[in-house]
Amino acid sequence: MKSFIRDEDGPTTAEYAVMLALMVIVVVGALSTFTGSIGGLFQSVADATSDTGGVDPERARGSANVR
């Protein structure tokens, strides 16, 4: 029992657990903060690219064969 109390591996494990918990809190906080802005960014890119009408595959093939 005395050797268990004097063993220093316990506090090291507890410190790692606290660091991991803090990292999880930071990641969850960052994701919840930036989720809306990242979603808005992707939506604006999708809207901008859909307005171009895309590339007609027949025209794309035909323009490559023009000499």
Image: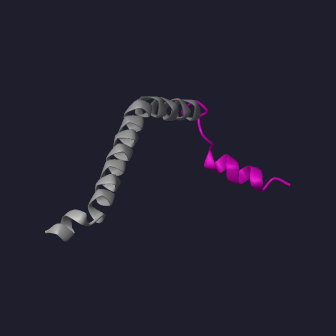
Q: Nearer the viewer, residue 19 or 4?
A: 4
Q: Is residue 63 above or below residue 50?
A: below
Q: Report the residue at 13% width, 69% height from top.
A: 1
Give whichever of 39, 64 is nearer the camera: 39
Q: Is residue 24 magenta?
A: no
Q: Which is nearer the eye, 54 or 25?
A: 25
Specify the quadrant that holds the C terminus. bottom right
**Above or below for 10 versus 58:** below
Whole-percent x and y of residue 27? 39, 42
The residue stretch that appears in magenta: 50-67
Q: Residue at x 42, y 36 (%)?
A: 30
**Where is residue 54 drawn, in percent x and y?**
60, 39
- The residue most toward the right is 67
Q: Is residue 5 left or right of residue 67?
A: left
Who's the residue at 38% across and 46% down the image? Answer: 23
**Left or right placement of residue 59 versus residue 13 in this view:** right
Residue 32 percent across, percent down from the top left: 37, 33
Tell me what residue is drawn at x 37 percent, y 35 percent.
Answer: 29
- The one nearer the camera, 13 or 65, is 13
* Picture quadrant where residue 14 is located: bottom left
Its colouring scheme is one colour
**Residue 53 magenta:** yes
Residue furthest to the front in view is 2
Residue 60 lies, in percent from the top left, at 69, 49
